Image (cartoon, rainbow, N blue to C red):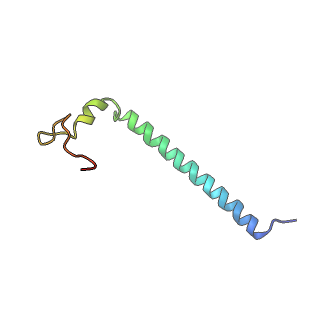
C-alpha cells in the first residue's frame, strides 16, 4: 500500500527542512573556523576599544536609558 499524497508531502518537507538545517550548520561551522584562522579572535580587548574615540572616551557614560 502506497502512502497518501499528504503523507508523502510531509515526508519530503521534513527531509527538506532537515537538509536545510544541515546546510545552515555547515555554514556556521565554516564561518567560525574561517574567522578563527584569519585571526578575528586574537585580540578582543584591543578590538573592543576601537569603537571609542576622543568624543566618547572609554569608561565615560554618554548614553543613558531611560533618560
Q: Measured from the top left, where is residue 34 in percent x and y?
A: 41, 39
* Residue lying at the far left of the rendered structure: 54
**Residue drawn at the location 81% of the way across and 65% of the way down:** 3
**Residue drawn at the location 28% of the way across and 49% of the way down:** 66
* Residue lying at the far right of the rendered structure: 1
Q: Is residue 64 above or below residue 20?
A: above
Q: Quadrant of residue 36?
A: top left
Which of the two residues, 52 or 31, is positioned nearer the viewer here? 52
Which of the two residues, 45 or 34, is positioned nearer the viewer here? 45
Is residue 11 rendered to the left or right of residue 21? right
Which of the two residues, 65 or 9, is positioned nearer the viewer here? 65
**Residue drawn at the location 23% of the way across and 35% of the way down:** 49
* Residue lying at the far bottom of the rendered structure: 5
Q: Quadrant of the N terminus?
A: bottom right
**Residue drawn at the location 52% of the way across and 49% of the way down:** 24
Q: Measured from the top left, where is residue 57 in percent x and y?
A: 16, 37
Q: Measured from the top left, where is residue 53 in percent x and y?
A: 15, 40
Q: Quadrant of residue 61?
A: top left
Q: Is residue 21 above or below residue 38?
A: below
Q: Measured from the top left, where is residue 15 in percent x and y?
A: 66, 56
Q: Quadrant of residue 9?
A: bottom right
Is residue 21 rendered to the left or right of residue 56? right
Amino acid at each position: 500500500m502506497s502512502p497518501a499524497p499528504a503523507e508523502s508531502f510531509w515526508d519530503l518537507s521534513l527531509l527538506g527542512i532537515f537538509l536545510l538545517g544541515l546546510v545552515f550548520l555547515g555554514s556556521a561551522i565554516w564561518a567560525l573556523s574561517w574567522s578563527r584562522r584569519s585571526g578575528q579572535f586574537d585580540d578582543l580587548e584591543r578590538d573592543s576599544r576601537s569603537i571609542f574615540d576622543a568624543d566618547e572616551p572609554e569608561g565615560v557614560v554618554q548614553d543613558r536609558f531611560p533618560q
